[in-house]
């Protein structure tokens, strides 16, 4: 059975899966020749960051920014690992010329900044565009601001679902969503305490309560509620208000996601997590056996690394 209080997260990457443990992040990628490539990145705990991650409503913001930065690093590795097939000799030669300390730091910071900026840009776009559209179409139709907020939320959902649907039609994104499904299946199988074999894992659903897709939906729903408590005069104040409240919406949404996950086994209350599961119908696809194999390999490698790190500290 899975150990108590062991909560693992994951992320689909290009032709692979990343799993995050308490002490290490591990990515497994299927290369073009069929072999697997791995990346292990130990966590480096920063005391003040760990303190912030224990504070409700603040921890969600810190966690999202941290995961965006680390996710970009692993996504970059997966892209390079999958594409790199004929340049192995050049790669080996490059490794002999090891970059200096400051070069490594610059590279890591660069990838982290790109990941965080991508996340922030996406949040700004999906926060501002629906407000602009709603203001343009319905500004003079009625004056009830709560109704304006509800329509803004509906527009946001339509844009989000439409965006995800259309990108899912591309072969690369479809395979990414299949690996997303494989990641969920492995975590569900682990939480159920079954042996992690391809046949066992494939029996589980691609949907999971504790997922970033669910978090996205909650930011929309929670945003509608929070915005409804505030009054704005004019278009500019409305936009500024949305931007200033973005950290609040993220923090509250994270706590709601944690809460709904804790209720997923309560028959009457489990429906609270359904909106996130519905979005996952788009962001996850049924994986092939070979994709599940990669996901299992990543998870097992992460668990082995976790054990190795803990034994080293003993």
Image: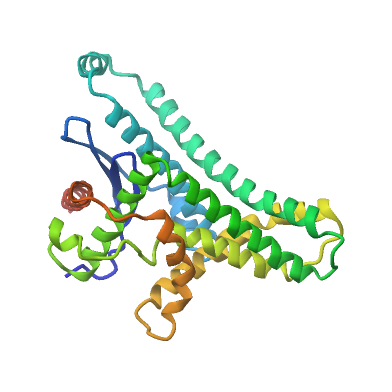
Query: Furthest-bottom residue in view?
Result: 268
Horizontal side of 254 relative to 71 (left or right) equals right
Q: Is residue 57 visible?
A: no
- Left or right: where 155 falls relative to 211: right
- Dividing the picture into quadrants, the one containing residue 111 is top left
Left or right of 285 on screen, residue 155: right
Q: In terms of depth relative to the viewer, which is nearer, 45 or 281?
A: 281
**Residue 211 image offset from top left, x and y in percent:** 40, 60
Vertical side of 163 occupied by 156: above or below: below
- Tell me where residue 84 sits by quadrant: top left
Q: Residue at x 82, y 50 (%)?
A: 236
State left or right for residue 179 relative to residue 119. left
For the question of whether residue 182 can be seen, the reply is: yes
Horizontal and vertical percent position of residue 157: 58, 59
Name the residue: 31% across, 50% down: 178
* Res. 101 image quadrant: top left
Residue 248's place in the image compared with 175, above or below, is: below
Q: How many marks?
A: 0
Question: How are the residues colored?
Answer: rainbow
Q: Position of residue 197 (x, y in %)?
A: 12, 58
The C terminus lies in which quarter of the figure?
bottom left
Q: Position of residue 8 (x, y in %)?
A: 30, 59
- State the residue at coordinates (28%, 18%): 98
Q: Is residue 227 above or below residue 134?
A: below
Residue nearest the observer in this picture, 280 or 253 = 280
* Above/below status of 174 relative to 94: below
Image quarter (top left, top right, bottom left or bottom right) of the N terminus: bottom left
């Amino acid at each position: 059975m899975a150990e108590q209080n062991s909560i693992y997260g994951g992320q689909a990457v290009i032709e692979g899966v990343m799993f995050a443990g308490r002490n290490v992040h591990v990515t497994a990628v299927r290369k073009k020749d069929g072999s697997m490539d791995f990346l292990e990145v130990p966590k480096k705990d920063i005391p003040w960051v760990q303190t912030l991650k224990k504070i409700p409503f603040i921890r969600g913001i810190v966690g999202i920014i941290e995961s965006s930065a680390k996710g970009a690093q692993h996504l970059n590795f997966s892209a390079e690992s999958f594409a790199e097939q004929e340049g192995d000799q050049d790669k080996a030669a490059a490794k002999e010329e090891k970059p200096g300390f400051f070069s490594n730091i610059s590279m890591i910071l660069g990838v982290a900044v790109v990941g965080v900026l991508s996340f922030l840009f996406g949040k700004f776009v999906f926060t501002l565009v629906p407000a602009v559209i709603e203001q343009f179409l319905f500004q003079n139709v009625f004056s009830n601001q709560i109704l304006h907020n509800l329509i803004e939320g509906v527009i946001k959902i339509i844009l989000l679902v439409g965006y995800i649907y259309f990108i899912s039609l591309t072969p690369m994104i479809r395979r990414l969503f299949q690996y997303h499904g494989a990641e969920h299946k492995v975590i569900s199988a682990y939480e159920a305490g079954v042996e992690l074999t391809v046949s066992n894992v494939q029996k589980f659903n691609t949907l999971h309560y504790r997922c970033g897709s669910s978090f996205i939906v909650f930011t929309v729903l929670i945003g509608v509620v929070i915005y409804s408590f505030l009054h704005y005069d004019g278009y500019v104040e409305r936009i500024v208000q949305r931007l200033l409240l973005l950290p609040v919406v993220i923090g509250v949404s994270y706590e709601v996601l944690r809460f709904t996950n804790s209720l997923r086994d309560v028959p009457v209350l489990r429906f609270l997590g359904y909106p996130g599961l519905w979005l996952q119908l788009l962001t996850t696809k049924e994986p092939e056996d070979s994709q599940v194999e990669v996901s299992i390999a990543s998870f097992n490698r992460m668990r082995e690394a976790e054990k190795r790190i803990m034994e080293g500290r003993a």
